[in-house]
Amino acid sequence: MKRKSLMICVLILMQIFLTSCWSRQELNKIAIAVGLGFDKQGDQYQVSAQVVLPSQIAGSKGGIAQAPVNLYKATGRTITEALRKITTKSPRQIYISHLRILVLGEDLAKEGISDVLDSLSRDTETRNDYFIVVAKNAKAEDALKVLTNLEKIPAVRLFSSLETSKKTWAPTSTVTLGTLITELVTRGKNPVLTGLVIEGSVAVGESLKNVESIDSPTQLNYSGLAVFKDDKLIGWLNQEESKVYNYLTNQVKESLAVRKCPNGKMASYKVFDAHAKVKGGMRNGKPEISIQQHMEADLTEVQCKDLDLTNPKTITELEQSINKEVSELFKNTIKKVQKEYKSDIFGFGEAIHRSNPQDWKKLRNNWDQTFVDMPVNIEMDCKIRLLGKVTNSFLQEMKTNK
C-alpha cells in the first residue's frame, strides 16, 4: 500500500515538471510568411509579407490556377503595428518563424535601418537564419511580387540562389540579422548587404505568365554589394569590387576569375583556395594596414592560342600577370571605399584594434577621418596549380595546321 502511494506521489510530481504545448500554433489559423519586405511611405513603414499557399505548393489537380504565394501589405508607424494591421486584409495571422528572406527597399536603407532591426531583434518567434538584402533602385514590395521558375516559392528561391552564389561565385554576401547587428555596433567595421535587382516589368513578373515560359520576362538577380555607413546606405560596389570585399574578409570558398593573358587575350581560372591576412600597425604614430592575399587556382579556359603551357616559364608569366592585375583591382577598390564612401567595410579598424589596442583607444572616436588617408600595402600571391585535362589548347594545333 505504501509503495502504491509512493508511486502516485511520484507521478503527481512528474506532472508538475512536464511542459505542454502552450505556444502551439494551429496551421489552419496562421499564414506562413517566408519573405518580408520593408519600405518607407512618408513617415510610416510599409510591411509586405509573402505568404505561402499550401494548396498550390502541394500541386493539387483541378480548380483555378493560382500563384503559389500571396502578398499582403500594410503601413504603420512602427514595423509591429504594420504587421498587425495586415490581419485586416489576411484571414489569418502572419506567422514569420519560417522567414527565409528579408528585403529592404533602397529608400528605406538610405534613411536608416536601425529601427527595423530593433523590431526584428526583439521578436521572440523568429529565427535569425534568414538573409537580408537590399532592393537596388526598387521597392521591397515589388521584389516580393515577382514569381520565379524552378522554385515555386520566390522567397525560397532567393534564399537558395544567394547561398549558392556565395559558395561558387563570390560577389555576393549572405548576411543574417545577428551578423548585421554585430557589424553595426562594432567600431572599426561597417556592414554591407547584397543588392537585389528586378530585371523586367513588375506587372509581368507578378502574373503567372512569368513562369509559363522558358525564359521568364521578369527576373530577380543579385548584383553588387550595398555599402553602409553606420545604419545608412551610402553607395554600391560593382561585381569585381564586391569580390575584393569578400576576398579581404575571407568569405570566398570558391570563385571564378577572368584575367588577361600577356598577349591581351583572356583566360579563366577557378579559384579554390583564397585567404587574406590583414594586419594593422603603427608607423610614426599613424596607423597602416598590410594585406597578404593568397590565391590558388586551376586554369579552366584559355583563349591565348600562342601560349605554350608545357613551358614552366609560361605559367610563371601568367601568375605574374594575374598578380599585377588583381593587385591593381584591390588597390582601386580600397581607394574608392576610402575616398568616395569613407566607410570602413573591410574591418581595418578591427585589425588596428587587435595589433595596437592602446593606440586604438585614441583613434576610434575619429576613425572615419583617419581611415580615409590611411596607407594600405598589398602583397599578392596567386598560384596556378592545374591546367585541366589538357595542356596546350587544340586551337593552337588548328592554327599551326592551317
Image (tube, rainbow, N blue to C red):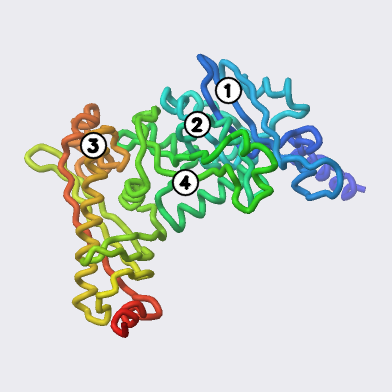
Q: Amino acid at mark 3?
A: Gln
Identify the residue position indicated by label 2 in the image: 138
Residue at the disc numbered 3:
338
- Say if 305 sits above or below 94 in the image: below
The residue located at (46%, 32%) in the rendering is: 137
Q: Quadrant of residue 359?
A: top left
Image spot of residue 239 (x, y percent): 37, 47
Q: Which residue is mark 4?
A: 174
Residue at 89 percent across and 47 percent down: it is 2
Q: Residue at x 62, y 33 (%)?
A: 203
Q: Earlier in the sequence, mark 2 or mark 4?
A: 2
Q: Residue furthest right?
A: 1
> For the residue labelled by badge 1, is the local secondary structure a helix, a strand or a loop?
strand
Alpha carbon separation for disc pair 1 and 3: 34 Å
Residue holding disc 1: 46
Asked if residue 309 is positioned above or below residue 169 in the image, the reply reads below
Q: How far across and how far down the image is residue 88, in percent?
A: 73, 20
The answer to which of marks 3 and 2 sits earlier in the sequence is 2
Bin the neighbour count of mark 4 within 10 Å (Cα to Cα): few under 14, some 14-19, many 20 and up. many
Q: Closer to us: mark 1 or mark 4?
A: 1
Residue kind at label 2, given as amino acid type:
Ala
